Image (cartoon, coloured by chain):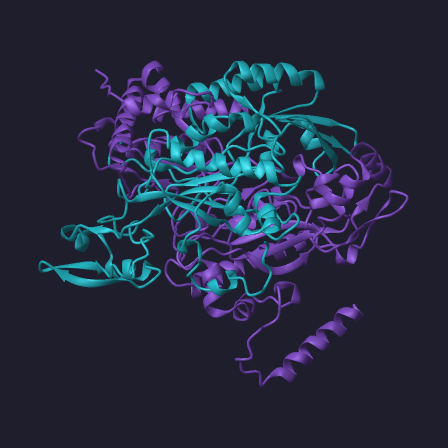
Amino acid sequence: MVKKYETPMLDVLEEGQWPSFISNIRRLANEHPSEFINDMTHSLLGQLEHSYETRKGYWKGGTVSIFGYGGGIIPRFSEVGDAFPASREFHTLRVQPSPGNYYTSGMLRQLADSWEKFGSGLITFHGQTGNIMFIGTNTENVQHFFDEINDYGWDLGGAGPCVRTGMSCVGAARCEQSCANEHKIHRLLVNNFMDDMHRPALPYKFKFKVSGCPNDCQNAIERADMAIIGTWRDDMVVDQTEIKAYIEKKGRKYIIDNVVNRCPSQALSLNDDDTLDVDNRNCVRCMHCLNVMPKALSPGEDKGITMLIGGKRTLKIGDMMGTVVIPFMKLETDEDYERLVEIAEEAIDFFAENALEHERTGEMIERIGLVNYMDGIGLEIDPNMISNPRESSYVRMDTWDEEATKWVEAQAEKAAS
Amino acid sequence: MSENAPMRPPIESGCPDGFQYMHPVMVKNFGAWAYHEDPEPGVLLHVAKSGDKIWTVRCGTARILDLFTLRKLCDIADEHADGFIRFTIRSNVEYMVGKEEQVQPLIKAIKDAGFIVGGTRNSVAMISHTQGWLHCDIPGTDASGVVKSMMDELIGEFKEWNMPNRVHITTSCCQINCGGQGDIAINIQHTKPPRINHDLVANVCERPSVVARCPVAAIRPALVNGKPSLEVDEKKCICCGACFPPCPPMQINDAEHSKLAVWIGGNHSNARSKPSFQKLVAAGIPNNPPRWPEATSIVKRILSVYKEDAKDWERINDWVDRIGWPRFFELTKLPFTKFHVDTWRGSRKSLNASTHIRF
């Protein structure tokens, strides 16, 4: 006999035009042929109603994993399991999607069929971590479900202090602004660290995120310990005929107000004949003008990536954006990609050895200074890494001459090559 | 399973190759797209250098999907979209089709099935959100419910292009803020120190880790009623809740005193200005299930002023940069308090060290 619960507060969330998650859960509770699913989802609704009434959460973590792995499962045990026994255990499996979140209906149906056998029937594409979230099953079924989907190509993502599931924007598959192969970067980086993902042993989490251009649709700079952003270093491509067509359509004032005047480095100038001049040396690749006129303006041909390190959210010392550690790097040859992976390995090794417990890379850099960090991972400093030079004179500089010579020699070497 | 049965070792295949799940037009034109157009709200047209075209129809869902809904989405893909689906990072569904004549039947099928077409260009996009009471172990609220309630009221803005630029809204059920940065963020803000169950601390919590977790060093080990426990210096405590995840007996969530706060101006893009963090604009908002009307009304107020006052292409942070914070508070009629003045490390950088003042 399936146990049902009164849920007057949740019922209110079935009203309104936006699709209702409560209706979704209730459909499983009332209409699904499996009694296991009916029971579990009714019980879930009961506990959720209890949360709504008391304004409290009632899930606790614990230890649940699959054989051979230490992470990837979010264990949930109910604190009010006696009142809602069918969802007493309600664990989530985090499963890694492809970069850019591509699916076929056939493959989604296959996952749905497996989840129907072993889980609550609730799924989210995707959690804020970028994982497919298979929400709600008991400890025993966690293993069975994983075994089944792992056999046809799916692997768990990260949870806990480890390398986490990567995330990428839609990318070169469908976007004219993409300057990188997000797919390749994402898979090379993440899949190189499967041991560090599945057996959490780092000081804290480490996230890779990839965006194909500086619009950063993947939110990499703010949300990733290592952000890879596609960019270009030659001149942007300007189609003057399309510029004129755009002016014809929108008017000269619109272009001046919304394109020329919005350029953050004043690198654009509209000529009297309605052609556009671009001061490419001073263009900061912000993407605004390309976004407004995607038909007229395109990224240049000499594409590559910028790498930023250290983005994270509030805990513990405050919000941090990732900051530049590599202003530009080509990604064309196998050696280029190998070098990228090598830098990631250095970054994770250094993090593993030097971060304090529960300290993110950005916080570690704040504590030890960017120069020490760069030294630690074997990268050279560059003026592109700062917004401005030091403002305080309180620093010991007795090796100034050596450092200045190093810079002058490096510049000479660059000029010669 | 009997004790002697060998366990199946995992195949550590990692992140799967997405090319096998991509529309053939996308595989063929990978890295070779020329430009895109926006034929109507919710629809994108991408044109490749080869001349190939692909249309995308985006629609909003409830994010917490069930098997029936997922299969319904698959049915739509099979009948109208060549069998391909992708999800945006804000949990919208995208169908991609290679022929223009597929677009309108696809839109009709999506709408008939109860999903909402929109969320492109200068609309209010789907609110990205976290797990909340449904599944999280430390939540102060239920993100799914907040999002459902707000999207019911903002659905018109999701379906149209009425905003100066795109608006990304996020929610978070605690101050860790898994929802991330948003043009508008609705986040839990605790206002009282944790209540400690001293009977449980010694057994449940690794005390030195909990002490280390506090951002303001307000926690110290103590003997309470003869048992090893932890105590909080309530004068120092900033009520952030960082101690609660490693030590559940330090309950931070409170039915009355865990409030909602609204932050604005978070922007991930490098377009125009550098990426920016969101700033506090309103707090003390009741955490009021099942519909959270007070939070929604503040969000709608900010959106209506932004819509009225911002210029084309200004995201919320660009707009406030231009008009200044005093004008923001004047226009939105939100109270400005001492809590808006930052006190955290580096906070002097947020003060106005100039005579740049608008009158």
Residue A191 in view here: no
Residue A384 or A375: which is nearer the viewer?
Answer: A384
Q: Is residue B84 left or right of residue B248?
A: right
B5 relative position to B85: left or right: left
Task: Using the image, determine if residue B322 lies above or below residue A21.
Answer: below
Where, quadrant-wise, is the N terminus of chain A in this rendering? top left
Quarter of the figure that contains the C terminus of chain A: bottom right
Q: Residue A358: x percent and y percent?
A: 38, 57
Disc count in the image? Answer: 0
Residue B267 seen in this snapshot: yes
Q: Which chain is cyan?
A: B
Q: Could you say which is closer to the camera, residue A113 or residue A217?
A: A217
Q: Which chain is purple?
A: A
Within the image, what quadrant is residue B223 found in?
Answer: bottom left
Residue at 58 percent of width and 65 percent of height:
B354
Residue that lies at the very extreme toward the front in this rendered image: B359
How far across and how far down the image is residue A296, in percent?
79, 39
Against A19, residue A160 (above or below) is: below
Q: Indicate the quadrant where residue B9 lies.
A: top left
Q: Position of residue A175 (x, y in %)?
A: 68, 37
Most extreme residue toward the right, as rendered? A273
Q: Residue at x 58, y 58 (%)?
A: B357
| Picture coordinates of residue A88, whole percent (x, y) | 24, 32
Q: Residue reaching furthest left? A: B226
Q: Going 37% across and 60% down the picture, which residue do you hit? A: A357
Q: Is A228 or B241 nearer to us in this picture?
A: B241
